[in-house]
Each structure stands twice: as C-alpha cells, then as structure tokens.
Amino acid sequence: MGKLKYFTFTLIVIVVETGLAYLVSQMTGLYLLDAMFYLGIACCATFIYFSSSGGMVANKNEAMVAASILGSKSNYSMKRSPFSLRLNPLVFGSIVFFVLGFVLAALF
C-alpha cells in the first residue's frame, strides 16, 4: 500500500473515531475527552485483536484441538505460532487517536 493511501486511510479512521466519540459524548453526557479515551481503548483492543495472529489465544486453541477426541484420532500435532501484528491503517489510526486523546486530556 502506498504511503499516501496509508496516510489517507489513517486520517479517515481518526476522523470517524472522533465523530463517534463526539456522538457518544452527546448521547451519554460524558466529556468529549473521556469518550475519546474509552472509545480509543475499545477500538485499539478490537482492531489489534482482529489484526493479529498467533500468540496466546491461537496456542490455546491449538492445544484444545490436540487434546480433543478428534485431534487424538487424527494424530494432530500442535504447532506453536508466535504473536504477530499487522500494523494496518485501522490499528495505527486507533493508536494515534488514543494517544491524541490522552495527550489532550493531560493538557486540559
């Protein structure tokens, strides 16, 4: 992906999350910076979970399959996979949004 396209999608993610934070703050009565913090954490966690592979969750699932009856019948061998994260525009934009909200909250 080109740098301009990556930057554009990252900027779109930041603008959409800012709009969502504003909407949440208006609907719930929270301050905008509080909504930015909570939404930033939620979006970061969600996008990191779906953009990563391997790690603890994958190894646990591999162990469950290997220990099951179906795994023992087919002589399933467990493969360990290290944690890897694709830093796509969704993840990067959410991290920038969270850090931006955190810095603004510290300043004001």
Image (tube, rainbow, N blue to C red):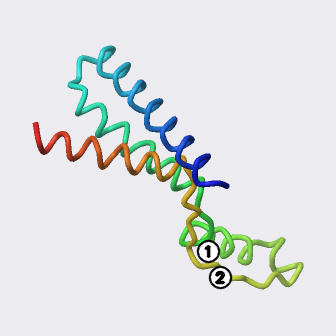
Provide the secondary structure element on which disc 2 rests.
loop
Q: Which residue is most to the right?
A: 74
Question: Which mark identifies residue 11?
Answer: none
Q: Residue at x 44, y 37 (%)?
A: 14
In the image, what residue type sits under mark 2? Arg
Give the quarter of the figure containing the N terminus. Answer: bottom right
Q: Position of residue 71 (x, y in %)?
A: 81, 75
Q: In this view of the protein, which residue sits in the foreground, 39 or 11?
A: 11
Left/right of residue 37 with respect to residue 90 in the rendered view: left
Residue at numbered disc 1: 59
Number of residue marks: 2
Q: Residue at x 24, y 17 (%)?
A: 29
In the image, what residue type sits under mark 1? Asn
Q: From the viewer's perspective, is residue 88 above or below residue 27?
A: below
Left/right of residue 67 with respect to residue 8 in the rendered view: right
Q: Residue at x 45, y 43 (%)?
A: 43
Q: Residue at x 42, y 26 (%)?
A: 20
Q: In this view of the protein, which residue sits in the foreground, 80 or 53?
A: 53
User: N-terminal of the two: label 2 or label 1?
Assistant: 1
Q: Mark 2 and 1 residues: CB-CB less than 8 Å, in contact?
A: yes
